[in-house]
Amino acid sequence: MRKRHLILCMVIAVLMIMPAAVFAGGRAERPAANELEIFSWWTAGGEAEGLQALIDIYNERYPEVNVINATVAGGAGAQAKAVLASRMQGGNPPDSFQVHAGQGIIATWVVEDFMEPVTFILEDNGWMDDYPADVIDIISYQGEIYSIPVNIHRSNVMWYNRSLFADNGLEPPASMAEFFQVAEQLRARGITPLAVGGTDGWEQTHLLESVLLAELGAEAYRGLWTGATAWNGTRAKAALESFLRVMEYTNPDRAALTNIDAAQYVAEGRAAMTVMGDWVHGYYLSIGHTPNEEYGWVPFPGTAGNFLMLSDTFGLPKDVPNPQNVERWLTLIASREGQDAFNPIKGSIPARTDADRSLYDAYLLSAMDDFGRDTIVPSVAHGAAASESWVTRINDVVNILVNNRNVDQAANEFQSLAQQYAR
Ligand code: GAL
């Protein structure tokens, strides 16, 4: 009787545990499945197709592997990062996941010991020299590489509607002073000068980083993330004032728009300009637009010669069930073939320096040339300059600043965050 009771208890226990395990990862019930789960936030036009191009090559090469394209929508990983964090903390990492080069991977996952080194992917294939040393540097920690960059994106790009500019006899602004003049003229004609999103909480930070770069220059901008530039000093405060002035020329419905919606406003002529990373180029291509026809681009006014960069990378979390499948994925995205399949669709340039230029359009060729000769500075909104926790706190301060317009308060809060996080 006691034995039967024991067995019953065990059955009940298994039944209670099983649904939780199945829910947690979908893996518990099929531990040996030959799968590769790729986790990202690439759901928008351009990026979804770029990712699919990579998965198609993987499927062709390794038809026996079931690739799971796991996406959580939301620009800049606004929702994906939280889902990822809970899976990582819960011991259920995706096999490989999109993560920003720089502090996004290093401070967030590597220092905390969640990742395996992947230096061997580049070394074994003889690809070390095919990547710029600066890029290798920001994905490395204590002599090892921890993620493989599939691209380079530029953040400080101002996209504009060419016919709106031409019809109003305007030239795209090259300096902050010109921006305010052009914006004034557009507004006087009833046109929203600058479209900005706000749904995901980071879009205004994206704009702010370009304004900070324009007003402070590359060196002082970098100092904001190392502690060398005071956020509450005169120059940084003047830059925050300038940011608020730029915000005066934006659409009032920001909170209802994603970054892609804002780009769409420009495509439809509902606004003249938007400042966003060059995934917007991928989006415009996906809706059938052509660079230099419907839309043009310039570096954010006052930032020509500087390239605010970010990079999407993938790594190998510790304890995944099929590390070989991940190594093959990383090898594919590290290869010239992989990068040349992905980037012309995604709207980014390859992280490798040996791309086949004939595959890239006028915008991407200009970005490649700029990346080769400009001063490279790290984007904060997209994880290159600061850890995820720091960026989250910055986004909060920016959103409050836009609402209460209290520069002193924001400058002091930014400064105390820098004291806490800068390295
Ligand atoms: C960035 C990411 C890009 C793009 C963008 C919009 O953070 O690096 O690849 O996805 O967000 O979601």
Image: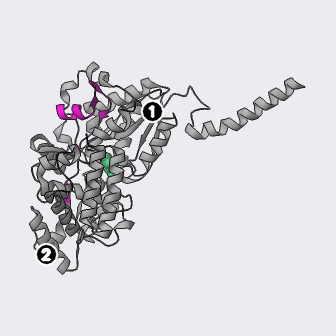
Residue range of the region highlighted in magenta in the rendering: 133-158
Q: Earlier in the sequence, mark 2 or mark 1?
A: 1
Q: Nearer the viewer, mark 2 or mark 1?
A: 1
Is-magenta flag for residue 137?
yes
Identified at 33% across, 25% down, the residue is: 118
- Nearest the eye: 63 or 411: 411
Q: Amino acid at mark 1?
A: Asp
Residue 172 in sight in this render? no
Q: SS of the residue at dot 1? A: loop
Task: Please identify the residue farthest to the top as the structure is shown.
Answer: 124
Identified at 11% across, 71% down, the residue is: 170
Tell me where residue 269 appears, x and y as whole percent. 25, 70
- Examine the image and state in which quarter residue 314 appears: top left
- Examine the image and state in which quarter residue 232 appears: bottom left
Residue 117 located left or right of residue 86: left
Instruction: Provide the residue designation for mark 2.
Output: 168
344 lies above or below 319? below
Tell me where residue 59 appears, x and y as whole percent. 42, 33
How many marks overall? 2
320 lies above or below 124? below
Instruction: Provide the residue designation for mark 1.
Output: 95
Residue 417 in sight in this render? yes
Mark 2 to mark 1: distance in Å?
A: 51 Å
Q: Amino acid at mark 2?
A: Asn
Tell me where residue 199 appears, x and y as whole percent. 38, 61
- Nearest the eye: 319 or 124: 319
Is-magenta flag for residue 107?
no
Task: Please identify the residue farthest to the right as the structure is shown.
Answer: 1
- Nearest the eye: 200 or 415: 415
- Examine the image and state in which quarter residue 234 appears: bottom left
Q: Quick check: marks 2 and 1 in contact, CB under 8 Å?
A: no
